[in-house]
Image (tube, rainbow, N blue to C red):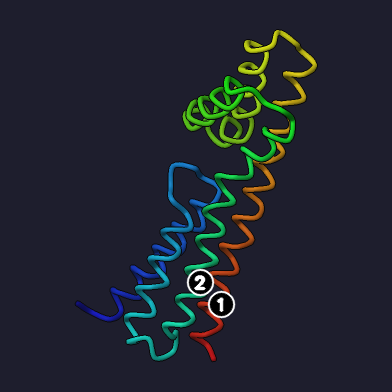
């Protein structure tokens, strides 16, 4: 296969992965990682060493874990019920069909509705919804920062 085509594929995977850090339908960090591994492989790991790929892999795993754990930690800190967690998950799925606004805010709505159904306490439902949403947003921010760290380390090692 042509080396130029492989580099284009590597860059496309990385760019698609960066988009995937905010679009939940795409596995962002996995795509970035795949593009980086492909880029390192193209050059036979001479510029981007195996050790660098391992470091980037660890950063990617941390980003992936934070993405899932942050919303749950926010909900747990607020004392969310199982129904609130289920509501946040359902809200996330429904939000996928509503564009970026849906992706950002439907987990909050889902968590609040789930908590209200579980405890019939409106103020608690709002608190749980907001805490869940805040956790998700902090996780998203951390994932985006770590994704750019992955790409930055890759690009820096290519240019050095």
Q: Residue 76 in the image: x percent, y percent?
A: 68, 34
Q: Residue 83 in the image: x percent, y percent?
A: 58, 19
**Residue ID for mark 1:** 153
Labels 2, 1: front one: 2
Q: Quadrant of residue 81?
A: top right
Q: In this view, does 26 lie above or below 37?
A: above
Q: In this view, does 84 lie above or below 140?
A: above
Count of marks overlaid on the render:
2
N-terminal of the pair, mark 2 or mark 1, is 2
Left or right: residue 3 versus residue 28 is: left
Q: Regarding mark 2 in the picture, which secondary structure is present there?
A: helix
Q: In which quarter of the image is residue 79?
A: top right
Q: Is residue 67 above or below residue 15?
A: above
The residue under the point 69% across, 11% down is: 119
Q: Residue 114 in the image: x percent, y percent?
A: 61, 17
**Residue ID for mark 2:** 56
What separation in Å lies between label 2 and label 1 (alpha carbons)? 8 Å
Mark 1, other Cα within 10 Å: few <14 / some 14–19 / many ≥20: some
Of all residues shown, which one is farthest toward the right?
A: 123
Image quadrant where one finds the N terminus: bottom left
Q: Residue 150 in the image: x percent, y percent?
A: 54, 69
């Amino acid at each position: 296969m042509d080396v130029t085509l492989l580099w284009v594929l590597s860059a496309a995977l990385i760019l698609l992965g960066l988009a995937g850090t905010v679009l939940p339908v795409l596995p962002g960090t996995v795509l970035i990682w795949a593009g980086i591994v492909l880029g390192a492989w193209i050059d036979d790991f001479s510029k981007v060493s195996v050790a660098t790929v391992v470091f980037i892999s660890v950063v990617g795993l941390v980003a992936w874990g934070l993405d899932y754990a942050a919303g749950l930690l926010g909900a747990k800190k607020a004392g969310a019920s199982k129904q609130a967690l289920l509501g946040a998950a359902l809200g996330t799925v429904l939000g996928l069909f509503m564009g970026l606004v849906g992706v950002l805010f439907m987990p909050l709505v889902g968590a609040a509705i789930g908590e209200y159904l579980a405890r019939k306490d409106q103020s608690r439902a709002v608190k749980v919804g907001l805490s869940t949403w805040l956790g998700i947003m902090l996780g998203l921010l951390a994932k985006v920062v770590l994704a750019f760290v992955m790409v930055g380390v890759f690009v820096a090692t290519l240019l050095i």
